[in-house]
Each structure stands twice: as structure tokens, then as C-alpha cells.
Amino acid sequence: MFSLEPDIPMADEDFRLIRDVIYAHCGLFFDNDSKYLLEKRLARRLALHQLAGYKDYYHFLKYNRKKDQELSDIMDVLTTNETYFFREIFQLKAFTDEILPELKKAKEKRGDRSLRIWSAGCSSGEEPYTIAMLLLEMGACKDWRIEIIGTDICHKVLQQARKAVYGRSSFRTTDEQYIRRFFVEQEGAFRVADQVKELVTISHLNLFDMGRLAMLGKMDIIFCRNVIIYFDQVAKKRVIDSFHKALEDGGFLLLGHSESLMNISTAFSLRHLQNDMVYQKPLAGSGGFPCP
Ligand SMILES: C[S@@+](CC[C@H](N)C(=O)[O-])C[C@H]1O[C@@H](n2cnc3c(N)ncnc32)[C@H](O)[C@@H]1O
């Protein structure tokens, strides 16, 4: 395809400097083989800021008074946002049939009828809206105060999540009955019904912004699926430690199927449920093992 961007090469040294700034900001790690990718994705930024090369761009990212805005803006071109409704259905079945009943029972015993569920790295919103649809289908919201919080670092996808209108590619594994019940057809696309939207809050959040993370409050369940695969080991550890702090004792952490806590954290227990294996923050005083 014809490209308007001039072909400015990125020197190896500039690549390392720029990728380290990006890494420190958001944990995304570009290894040495990704230089070409970074060069292509950032080419427009040189043109936009009328910079002669990537050395200047590095200085811009590091010292310009608009550096924070620039780092925030480039998340739109650096993140991978692939997602769809009802992704990883076995895990969702573990969520509805095993995790929720267990959690609700434990909370009810304490006289607590509230549930806070966080979709961390929610992309364009399919994941938090899937969670809301499942809860509505189960009738789990009756007499319970349910909050589903979807957060992401990328502004472009968050706009889409707030709009909540989706094309066919978001429905590749969605049963027709959910489309009929929870969507309104709109000019060839599908808008999420208000009763689903009302359960979900969409916010901008960088998982490495520890100050803002602490303000989110305690969660009962964290979905962080297909997000930490883009981080290196050190960044994974930081994010998982902050999830541990954010979770209530006995709360659950659901990662993507290709992700695990092996060599990252021993602070969670691995629960072998019937439908899937999931991580749980041990109950206080349980000696490290959760009580089923
Ligand atoms: C592949 S999508 C996963 C979407 C959804 N969780 C799923 O499994 O279908 C990964 C998302 O993580 C987000 N992400 C990456 N780094 C992040 C960070 N440091 N803070 C918050 N979100 C981040 C990306 O913007 C992207 O939308």
C-alpha cells in the first residue's frame, strides 16, 4: 500500500532507548527482533511532530513538556487489542458454575451482598459485557450490588467500549440466544442493551500506575486475560503483585489460557475446578490454602 510516511530508519541505539521508555511506562516489552515493528508503528509520530529522526523522537518522549500525552497517545498504535465476546468459554463456565456460587455463599455468610469484578485490559469491552450478560442470565444481580469495572490503557478501544456497538467479528463464539436477548440491531451492527451496560463502568487505567491502581479498591474477581503475555518477567511480577493487593482474601484471578503464574508468584493457590484451573488468593489464616 502507498504510505505517506517517509522511510526513516531507526538506529539500534535509538530503538533500545525508545523501547526502554515505553517499557517503563506500560510494561510492554519489544525485544530486539521487534525493531522493525516499532519503527513502522511510530513513523507517523515523527511526521506529526516534525522530527527528523528517532533520536529526536526519543528526546521528545523523555524531555518534552508533552511527553506524558505522547506516551499515552502512542498506546493506540503499540497495543494488541484482539478480543471477542464469550472468549475462553470453559473458564467462563468455571466462573458461573463454580466460582460465583462459592464466592456468593461465603459473602452471604458475612452478610455481604456485593460483588466487584475487574476486567483488567478489557480492550473494546467485549469481556466486561460478557461478564455482565452471564450474571444477568444467572439472575445473579437480584438483591446483589454488582460492579463490573473494565479498564485499559488504550484510548481508542475504550471509546469503542463506551459506545458498545459491535460488528460480526466480535461474535465469533457467541450463541445466537445472547445476541437476541442482550443486543439491539443497529444499522447492520449490534448495540449492547442498556441493562447490560448499566452493570459496567469503563475507565482508562495503566496497570503500572500504582497510585491510580490503589484507588480502585478491593476486588472479588480479577479477569486479566491475554494481557501479561506482552510483558517481560519483571513487569509480570509487578502487575501480579498489585492484583494480589487488590483482591479480597479468597478472591479469584483469571488469566488467559496461555498464561500462568509459574516463576512469577507463589502467593496464589492454583484451584483445579471442574471446568478450568484458576488462581485464588488464600483466605487469611488458611495457611496458604483456600477453603473450598
Ligand atoms: C489482547 S487484549 C485482551 C482483551 C481481553 N482481556 C481478552 O482476553 O479478550 C490486551 C489488552 O491489554 C491492554 N494493555 C496492555 N498493556 C496494558 C497496561 N500497561 N495497562 C492497561 N492495559 C494494558 C491492551 O491495550 C489491550 O487492549
Image (cartoon, grey):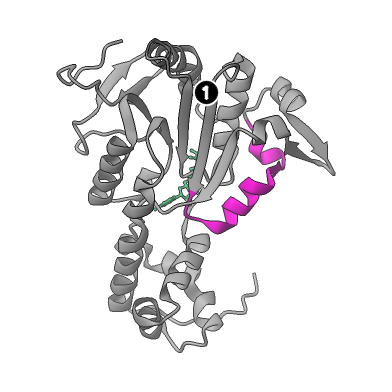
Q: Position of residue 154 (x, y in %)?
A: 51, 56
Q: Is residue 107 above or below residue 25?
A: above
Ligand 1 contact, mark 1 (Cβ < 8 Å): no
250 left or right of 172 in image: left
Q: Which residues are magenta?
A: 152-172
User: Which x, y percent locates residue 40?
Assistant: 49, 70
Q: Is residue 235 visible?
A: yes
Name the residue tied to disc 1: 89
Is residue 15 magenta-colored?
Answer: no
Residue at horizontal 39%, vertical 76%?
Answer: 61
Dot 1: what SS?
A: helix
- Looking at the image, residue 251 lies above or below residue 170: above
Q: Viewer-proximal residue, 228 or 218?
A: 218
Please provide percent x and percent y for residue 173.
Answer: 62, 28
Q: Magenta includes 160? A: yes
For the residue marked with disc 1, what is the amino acid? Ile
The quadrant of the rendering that contains the C terminus is: top left
Q: Residue at x 50, y 17 (%)?
A: 96
Residue, far right: 187
- Pick the residue in front: 40 or 176: 176
Magenta: main secondary structure? helix
In the picture, measured across the screen, residue 157 lies left or right of residue 13, that is right
Judged from this view, the residue extending furthest toward the front is: 111
Nearer-the-camera pick, 181 or 250: 250
